[in-house]
Amino acid sequence: MSSSPEVCPCVFCPQVRSVFSRLIYSFLLLVIISASASVAPAQSPTATLTGTVTDQNDAVIPGVNIGVINIAQGFQRSAVTDEHGAFVVPLLPAGNYTVKAEREGFSPAEARDVILNVNDRVALKIQLKVGNINSQTVDVLDMPALIDESPAVGTTVNRQFVANLPLNGRSFQSLIALTPGVVLVPGSSVNNVGQFSVNGQRANANYFTVDGVSANTGNGVGAVPGQATSGTLPGLTTFGGTNSLVSVEAMQEFQVQTSTYSAEYGRSPGGQISIVTRSGANEFHGTVFDYLRNDKLDANDWFANRARQPRPPERQNDFGGTFSGPILLPRFGDGGSQPWYDGRNRTFFFFSYEGLRLRNPKFALTNVPSVNLRQTAATALRPVLNAFPLPNGRILANGFAEFAATYSDSQSLDATSIRVDHTVGSRLTFFGRYNLAPSQGLRRDGSSNLSTIAGSELRQEVITAGATMMLTPAISNELRVNFTRNEGKSFQRQDNFGGAVPVPREVLLPAQHAPPGSNSNGATTFFLAGMSTAFLPQVSITDSAATQRQFNINDTLSLTTGSHQWKFGFDYRRLTPILSPRSYILAMSFTTPANLTNGVAPSATVGAGFETHPIYHEFSAFARDAWRISRRLTLDLGLRWDVNPAPGEANNNLPLAIVNADDPRTIALAPRGTPLWQTTYNNFAPRLGLAYRLFESSGREAVLRGGFGVFYDTGNSQGSAGFDRYPFVPTTLRSNVTFPLSATQVAPPPFTIAPRY
């Protein structure tokens, strides 16, 4: 294999020394620019098209006018080849393009159906024939192979691929799992589901973006604050689907970058998942769909048959539709002769709606108090035991018996979005998108008490706006602004499933003993240890709520100079969640049948909590140079700067910090108000990547990629857990208490939080 003619294989020749000198100069310049205060922009959901124009003898042609035309919306971007016959057109939305090439003395040529995907950096080779530009003949080139010149390793999934697959639930998590290096991991709690690990990273180290802004707006209502409310998880539905981010029918495509990605990407060291939504086009289009599943088409569960339980209902209706096209605007000042303006090539809309109504069949075999235990228990506790379903199976040891049943959990979703794109001219385009996606899930607690219904609700509202500006043929800028509000609540209720009798709240917590707030946002739980069983049946009534709020702004400036394509950017994100924990907590544990007979609990926990308002600030800046050294070799140099202060609190009620953590002998609590960690300002992350074309002949294209990088995490996932600990949720442990508890015993411990100011 011969080396590229532009690069001499001799290490000591002047050409190689020049290349390495330029390499060092570029990297030092990146360092200087990144460290200055004038940096401007962040990660972009667009593509970059590069290329080379040659004649029939494979000699490069400078001064060729290049036109890149978007087929659906009709806009055009322009460029001119340099002295090496190369051109670069950045910030192109994903889509189908026609590329035209014209120069005096050559016949015009065009390449059709050039498909660009999100985050692409692809190269196109165009060959012109000697001829007359004024002739009517245009050479239509066979679709040449697009060579990916990016060092990043990733997988792109477009809309056509998704449309041809039967996705259960119409969520694309299963498609993410097709990416090499991705492994699905178990989930737990509300909105802490549907996660995956990339190349061994933690499941909360992945960073989602939709149209270039952060989608890590998960709300872990009912879960321990941490990764669920600190901006490290995506804003999924209550059942872990991506429908709340983007419905499948409203998605243009998405890309998962797993390694060696450029300095443009970061904030989390795991996978970078970039999602792009669909835009309208010059023609009106609409779709209607309904995906149906029904138990009439399915067999009963094998375990349900064995336990002689009926087939539970199964209903799934995933329905909706899309409608898109140009917007016809009224025309003013023409006397009414043409009352409407044809919005083709200027303003477009795309509307989508998806609804889901699901009843998911389940079978469970659980342990419940036996009839004898219910009759011999203390009088005050009998209503608690009767809140469990009546046994219908074997009698077990220690006062328990089996209960088997089939049932159906329910889930629902209503996801609505509308996107509007407007072209001011060839140099300026705008877009705006609004997304509203409430979801709800109701499930029976199959591991504890089937008469308990655990419910969760989420309502995610997203507003995103952006602008792309072509300042000059060589300079372009892309701006994105986003606000997201994700409200949620969780609760547990009891019903009469399996013959259970719900416990009145005044039995669990007598009214004369109930502290303020315990009836509106509290938790009362009875644990009955199964002795010979492996789980804890319980009777529980709980309520909790949380709201996640995000403001995100980022900007990307692209500059093309010769064989270098520079990008400079910043990304600022501010998260201000509202945590509303249970205002009152009472939990009693009975460990032996004798405890139930005597009505004495060996242990009881009484606690309380109050609303907190954490604040997270995250700032990133980067500088990047995609240097095309030759037609075969592309080098990607970059430097990223991440600043992640410790979380604050709106009322200055900070979590407790510790000092001397590295020495257990001297570890101690820090003074109140001490940040969890000191902000570091030297989190510089260099990135180096290369892509080398091993073979260029059609049908045998091969690219060798490699890279090196330093990555930083925000640390918020670990630091946020402090908002669910003392002193925010003080608890008192009491021993050998008799039910019902006295007024003194049910009283929560006093708060030790400093006054708000």
Image: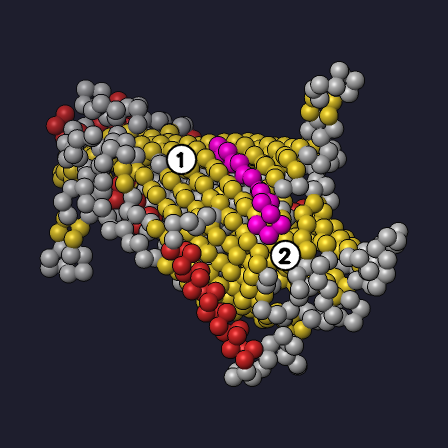
> Can residue 336 be seen in the rendering of this structure?
yes
In the image, residue 704 lies at what x, y percent? Answer: 58, 71
Going by the image, does 560 lie left or right of 134?
left
Q: CA distance from mark 2 to mark 1?
A: 38 Å
Q: Residue at x 23, y 48 (%)?
A: 676
Vertical comparison of 431 with 508: above or below: below
Q: Residue at x 48, y 37 (%)?
A: 482
Please identify the residue farthest to the right as the structure is shown: 136
Color scheme of the displayed model:
secondary structure
> Can residue 203 be seen in the rendering of this structure?
no
Is label 2 in contact with label 1 (beta carbons under 8 Å)? no
Q: Secondary structure at mark 2?
A: strand
Question: Looking at the picture, which amino acid does disc 1 mark?
Answer: Arg
Q: Secondary structure at mark 1?
A: strand
Q: Split into 4 quadrants, where in the image is the N terminus?
A: bottom right
Q: Nearer the viewer, residue 22 or 651?
A: 22
Q: Which mark is residue 549?
A: 1
Vertical comparison of 295 with 176: above or below: above
The residue that disc 2 covers is: 88
